[in-house]
Amino acid sequence: MNSRSGKSAKADSKPVRIVAPYPFTYTFRVKPPETGMPLLVFLLRRFPFRSSSGWEERINDGRILCNDAPALPETLLKQGDLISHHNPRVTEPSVPDAVRILEETDSWLIVYKPAPMPVHPGGRYQKNTLIEILGEMTDGPLHIIHRLDSVTSGLMLIGKNPEFSHKASLAFKHGDVEKAYFALCDGVPKDDAFSCDFGIRREKGYRFTCAEDGKQALTKFRTIKRGPARSIIQCEPVTGRTHQIRLHLAALGFPVYDDDVYRSDGGNLLQNTAISLQSSVLRIPALDVNYAIDVPSDWNDKL
């Protein structure tokens, strides 16, 4: 199969996908580090997007149960406890209606995921997710092989059968996948090529940080285009830590320009809008997977 390079994955219009409100019960288990936490503290740690008063109201209304029984905000949790949260009227955030199948074989799909859009159900999203939308577009089972942050757009490989999905998953695990991203960043690097090997660990909630005691991480960078105050940088993650590219760029002084989590002083724990980071190259030579897309055309206007 030939590489598909020089193609744009951005649609000219920006339609929005909206689903009608629906009832849903979320369930999750208490993990060992959460043992002994009061229920209210547990909910705030797991789901910081809702306030303390918001969670306490739901507990007191009986919409949050512990092991199928009513609980109190101060109820102490044990490892393995089943917490359920019933929402009688889930209103999911809208997402871009721009999922596209770019390449398809009997074994896999290469798709374009717009942002912001989560890959699989979880949190506030059950139907406005990549895998659910692809399920409406295709027949047969689909297998998620790798991850892409909700706020990041670009290429994803989706398996269509267990055999291929297993082989592809091993390729990602063993570093046999060539990946590259484009990022529109604040600041202008002097060097054409540079790298970052700062370790990464979880800081709080969904936020991570660079730290000496973090997990080993390495990202290689290449400056693609320079503007007066911003630049387009190609990013090649050698390892696959959570938020690795965003963290390394910020640590080097070139944060993704609209990434409010890592270009700030740490006050923002959640990013709910798309950022200018695109998965643009995806190659697995051993499995004949080879696809690439261009830098989004509107980035040049933002340099």
Image (cartoon, rainbow, N blue to C red):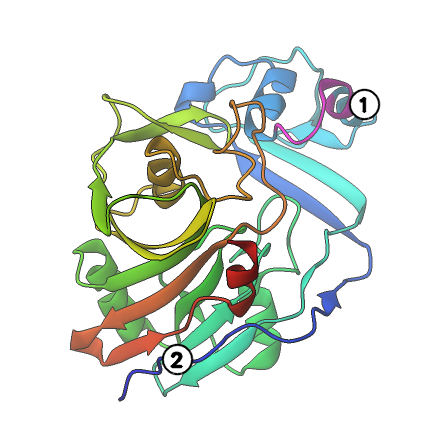
Residue 57, numbered circle = 1
Residue 94, numbered circle = none
Image quarter (top left, top right, bottom left or bottom right) of the N terminus? bottom left
Asked if residue 53 is among those painted magenta in the image, a careful observer would answer: yes
**Residue in the picture at 42% in, 23% down:** 203
Residue sitting nearer the eye, 121 or 104: 104
Residue sitting nearer the eye, 7 or 112: 7
Quarter assignment of residue 202: top left
Give amino acid for label 1.
Glu
The Cα–Cα distance between marks 1 and 2, rounded to whole angstroms, is 52 Å
Give amino acid for label 2.
Gly
Where is residue 130 drawn, in percent x and y?
55, 64
What residue span does the magenta drawing correspond to? 48-55
Where is residue 116 drawn, in percent x and y?
60, 54
Dot placed on the residue nearer the N-terminal end, 1 or 2? 2
Residue placed under numbered mark 2 in the picture: 6
**Extreme residue toward the front, this view:** 228
Q: Is residue 34 above or below residue 87?
A: above
Q: Is residue 157 above or below residue 42?
A: below
Residue sitting nearer the eye, 226 or 129: 226
Where is residue 118 drawn, in percent x and y?
55, 54
Where is residue 169 drawn, in percent x and y?
27, 62
Image position of 261 (left or right of 244): right
